[in-house]
């Protein structure tokens, strides 16, 4: 007896695709606690760079960046550039709007 092989073809209707659903809650990078922590730091220390905020708070760099951009758009903070006369990128500082 010879074994026969049958090929199984899948049609698009039988294939299952996995899709990830995005959570409906606010992502953890945009919590009110992070915003409050950054604004409290700027209130107590004055103008700081993103790197200084990251170092002083321990919040991840991308979270600090995203939060500062949202605070900038909402008008809570403003940024300014300080050129120190050296070559390279100037320092960008963030401060609370008075």
Image: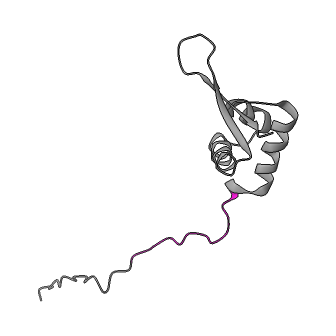
Residue 64 in the image: x percent, y percent?
68, 43
- Position of residue 24 relative to residue 48, above or below, is below
Q: Residue at x 85, y 38 (%)?
A: 43
Q: Is residue 19 magenta?
A: yes
Q: Nearer the viewer, residue 88 or 5?
A: 88
Q: Nearer the viewer, residue 49 or 55?
A: 49
Residue 71 in the image: x percent, y percent?
70, 48
Q: Which residue of the protein is positioned furthest toward the front in this rendering?
A: 98
Quadrant for the N terminus, please.
Answer: bottom left
Res 91 quadrant in image: top right
Give the main secondary structure of the magenta stretch: loop
Residue 87 in the image: x percent, y percent?
53, 12
Residue 83 in the image: x percent, y percent?
61, 17
- Position of residue 21 relative to residue 83, above or below, is below
Q: Nearer the viewer, residue 16 or 91?
A: 91
The span shown in magenta is 17-28
Q: Is residue 89 left or right of residue 5?
A: right
Res 93 quadrant in image: top right
Q: Residue at x 39, y 76 (%)?
A: 17
């Amino acid at each position: 007896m010879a074994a026969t092989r049958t090929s199984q073809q899948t049609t698009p209707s039988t294939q299952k695709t996995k899709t990830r659903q995005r959570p409906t809650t606010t992502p953890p990078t945009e919590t009110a606690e992070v915003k409050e922590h950054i604004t409290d730091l700027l209130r107590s220390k004055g103008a700081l760079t993103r790197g200084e905020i990251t170092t002083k708070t321990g919040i991840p760099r991308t979270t600090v960046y995203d939060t500062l951009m949202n605070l900038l758009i909402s008008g809570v903070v403003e940024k300014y550039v300080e050129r120190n006369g050296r070559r390279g990128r100037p320092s960008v500082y963030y401060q609370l709007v008075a």
